[in-house]
Amino acid sequence: KGKIVDLLTDRADAVVRFQGGHNAGHTLVCDGQKTVLHLIPSGVLRADVQCLIGNGVVLAPDALLTELHELEERGVPVRERLRLSPACPLILPYHVELDKARELRRGDAKIGTTGRGIGPAYEDKVARRGLRLGDLAQPERFRRRLEEVLEYHNFQLEHFYHVAPLDVNAVADAALAQGEELLPMMADVTALLHELRRRGAPILFEGAQGSLLDIDHGTYPFVTSSNTTAGGTATGSGVGPLYLDYVLGITKAYT
């Protein structure tokens, strides 16, 4: 998938991630140099391509910053090219702990999660208790909401999974520090996409997993927690389905 996306970015003005998180990898080879991207859109290596992460993506601040710093060390001006939706749900340390604890408890019935907190973060989003990227712009409010959410999750971790609870101040301090780097890249991604559309600019929407991992249309329950098929493009970016001109599916001829 990464090779095809890399090829198609030559024709795009913008590349958009619309679902998933850092639980998949796209391998690119540019000028003979190999790059594996988990979260940042594949167009980031192209000088004239804008990279957007839409509201449908669950965002792990630590994973994004690690990827960003690695690219910057190679001279890629990521901060100039990348824009993040304020509506991206955050993956925080308690999501990772829950993911691992649940999979361990399933034993032989485990579903094959990557243990990176993707499922629990989407679960919080649907339950309307999730914290989002935009919340980091209001530190005191963020702390208050985190206290409520973490009290709920710590109860599960400690009393059901028998895992040590997390410290709310440590989680808050780390997230807010990461937010200082991420917030300057925050923008209304939906508005940017509609502006690009009005100009007639070609936009590439980049999926992160295969069709059979789709939460609704895949091999349930052995699936991911988002809509990986084309229908997820609209809800995960804010661009209506009428504006999606062409859908390309990719399959490997080998494993």
Image (cartoon, rainbow, N blue to C red):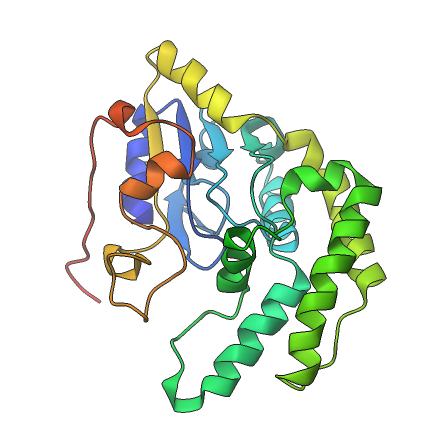
At 20% from the left and 39% from the top, the residue drawn is: 248
- The residue furthest bottom is 108
On the image, which quarter does residue 86 sit in? top right
At 33% from the left and 31% from the top, the residue drawn is: 204
Q: Position of residue 68 (x, y in %)?
A: 61, 44
Q: Vertical placement of 33 versus 119: above or below?
A: above
Query: In the image shown, does 26 or 238 lie closer to the viewer?
Result: 238
Could you tell me if residue 48 is visible in this image? no
Where is the C terminus found, in terms of image quarters? bottom left
Q: Position of residue 85 (x, y in %)?
A: 56, 34
Left or right of 235, for residue 162: right
Query: In the image shown, does 162 or 75 lie closer to the viewer?
Result: 162
At 34% from the left and 50% from the top, the residue drawn is: 227
At 32% from the left and 12% from the top, the residue drawn is: 200
- The residue furthest left is 253
Query: In the image shown, does 251 or 168 lie closer to the viewer?
Result: 168
Q: Position of residue 19 (x, y in %)?
A: 42, 46
- The residue furthest top is 199
Could you tell me if residue 253 is visible in this image? yes
Say how many tags the image has.
0
Q: Vertical placement of 146 versus 102: above or below?
A: above
Left or right of 219, for residue 6: right
Left or right of 163, for residue 235: left
Query: In the image shown, does 90 or 72 lie closer to the viewer?
Result: 90
Q: Position of residue 96 (x, y in %)?
A: 60, 67
